[in-house]
Image (cartoon, rainbow, N blue to C red):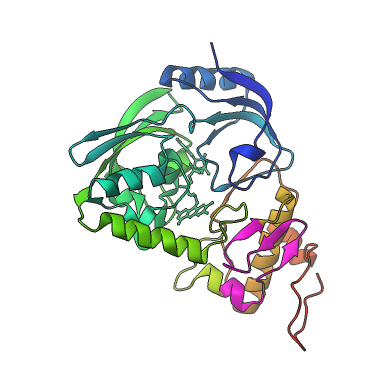
Amino acid sequence: MLNLFENIPLKDKTSYKIGGAAKFYSEPRSEEEIIELYRFALQRGLSVFVLGNGSNVVVSDEGLDGLVINLSVNFSKLDWDGSSALVSSGFSLDELAEAAAQKRFGGMEELSGIPGTIGGAVVMNAGAFNTEISHTLRSVRILKISTLTIETIPASELAFGYRQSAIKNSGNLVLSAIFDFKLSPDATQIRQRILDKREQKQPLDFPNCGSVFKRPPGNYAGTLIESCGLKGFKAGGAMVSPKHANFIVNTGNALAEDVRSVILHIQKTVFDKTGILLEPEVIFIGKFSFSLLDVFAGGVAGECPPSKAGEARPPY
Ligand SMILES: Cc1cc2nc3c(=O)[nH]c(=O)nc-3n(C[C@H](O)[C@H](O)[C@H](O)COP(=O)(O)OP(=O)(O)OC[C@H]3O[C@@H](n4cnc5c(N)ncnc54)[C@H](O)[C@@H]3O)c2cc1C
């Protein structure tokens, strides 16, 4: 029997704490059940969205008229074989980094504190401090959606790039992954240094989705946004963090459309001032009413932070 529910709010399944409900929602308990869920969706013509920890997504206020499969609950197994780890897709990336560091295994210390699952991290090729998850990845077991068959694919065939992988574009589902670690006597100290840096630099006291924009070539999104005076810019309950400009935080009751408005305002302002169009890293789920064309046509509603004396204000 399918572990399937209707009209489940997705708000609490994401780090942003924003968004509407999924028409159908499941936390499958086995690989067979996942396959059955895809058959269920196919029969009804439903779109399927695979959710990990929901730490890189903005869910539309209208929710999703499809099926959400959440693997973060029941797919969280970790087995060690020497310095290699076989990990289910719903296992926490940070807990894997911690378990490896405790064994004095290195390769993932720099990824400490990233609040995703292994599945989400592999798909996004999560990275920080010059380390990407693909650097330690040996292979993944995926469910191929076109045939509903399971295959093991070596990391070398996954076309990893900056926050990019072949899986992201294929829609296939990550079931598990194998990672190979190297000995690193300083692993726990490095991990702690990274966690301290995150605490210092990131607005972790507000719901957020991590870095909203990808790093543009030769620059940093946060630096560009800050230099355009946008720290503190607000639309509804969404605000450019005064602590880190590449974070848009939910100050309490933000709507997805507020986040989208802030994103568009940032894109327009940074583009007007620097000629650089920032590309979102965050993934949008469901329908959104704004488009980039809207913002170039006239801007979006928002509120600027208090101005410094004599500073000009944009009209929206
Ligand atoms: C405070 C904070 C700090 C962050 N810091 C970083 C950072 O330093 N570096 C970084 O790269 N990211 C960072 N992120 C973003 C995010 O944590 C990562 O992208 C993470 O890898 C996403 O994992 P997730 O399980 O939450 O995926 P989700 O957000 O649930 O999903 C992300 C994407 O992966 C897909 N997906 C998830 N699981 C699977 C699966 N099993 N099979 C197929 N597709 C799947 C989803 O469909 C979606 O397209 C941060 C986020 C926060 C909130």
Occupied quadrant, residue 65: top right
Magenta includes 233? Answer: yes
Above or below, 40 against 182 in this view is above
Magenta includes 123? Answer: no
* Position of the C terminus by quadrant: bottom right
Q: Is residue 62 left or right of residue 101?
A: right
Above or below, 140 against 299 in this view is above
Residue 299 at what x, y percent from top left?
77, 65
Occupied quadrant, residue 129: bottom left
Occupied quadrant, residue 224: bottom right
Q: Is residue 96 left or right of residue 123?
A: left
Residue at 34%, 47% (x, y): give it: 98
Residue 153 at what x, y percent from top left?
30, 36
Residue 195 at what x, y percent from top left?
42, 58
Residue projecting furthest to the top: 1
Inspect this view and state whether residue 158 appears.
no
Residue 217 at what x, y percent from top left?
45, 69
Above or below, 4 against 152 in this view is above
